[in-house]
Image (cartoon, helix red, strand yellow):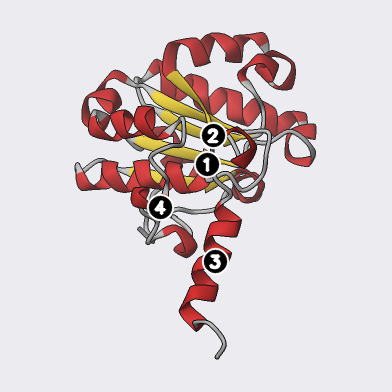
Amino acid sequence: MERARIPRRYWDVKLSAVPDSTPYKQPFKTYLRDIDSLIDKGIGLYLYSTEPSTGKTSLAVLALKRAMEMRHTVLFVRLPEFRLDVFGKEQFDEDSTVLDRARKVDLLVMDEVNSGSAMDVKYIGNIVLELVQHRSQHMLPTIITTDIPPGSVSTEFSPYMVGLMQESFVPLDIVGESAGGMNWRAFKSAELQGLLGEES
């Protein structure tokens, strides 16, 4: 997982932590079940939520872990850091940059493709669009985590991105507690408190 650049915090994430009652769990389980054929078809996920800490990144990593089990090449990039990797031509290994690797792995996660500071830079928006376009043309799926609902993609990226999404992404609304989802930060906080036990 280190070679895939998956942050250490997410190495032990499990789907069992997500309650069965969450409206997105069953379609996500279906994606995991069929991930081998979906990768072959170039079908990724667009995991979005307007609320913070709903578990989008954790779900994206679960998909990467499942793909790795199926012997696919994978890569995790977080947009704020990826911006620096692109500007600095960060090397992935001796033969390729991180951007090169992102263009050719079987399954790519682009995390935190959010509205705001990262997307204010037009060049970065173009990098995202070019990368998704390249991967879509080569039937290589991408998983995006974002706070941008599908209806706002045209204004945040471009109308062309809408077409790419229709061809290559399954959108999943990773709702928060107010709509039957979960707050992952609160879940992890309770888990940590459990490790310490109750005061006597």
First of labels 4, 3 by sequence position: 4
Question: Relative to residue 120, is residue 188 depicted above or below?
Answer: below
Tell me how far mark 4 sits from mark 1, CA to CA. Answer: 13 Å
**Contact, CB < 8 Å: mark 3 with mark 1?**
no
Q: Nearer the viewer, mark 4 or mark 1?
A: 4
Which mark is drawn over residue 174? 2
Mark 2 falls on what kind of element? Answer: loop
Mark 1 falls on what kind of element? Answer: helix
The x and y percentages for residue 76 are 46, 47
Tell me how far mark 2 sits from mark 4, CA to CA. Answer: 14 Å
Question: Relative to residue 33, is residue 88 depicted above or below?
Answer: below
**Contact, CB < 8 Å: mark 1 with mark 2?**
yes
Q: What residue sits 66% from the left and 14% below the top?
A: 151
Tell me how far mark 3 sits from mark 1, CA to CA. Answer: 19 Å
The residue under label 1 is 56
Mark 4 falls on what kind of element? Answer: helix
What type is the residue that disc 2 sits on?
A: Ile
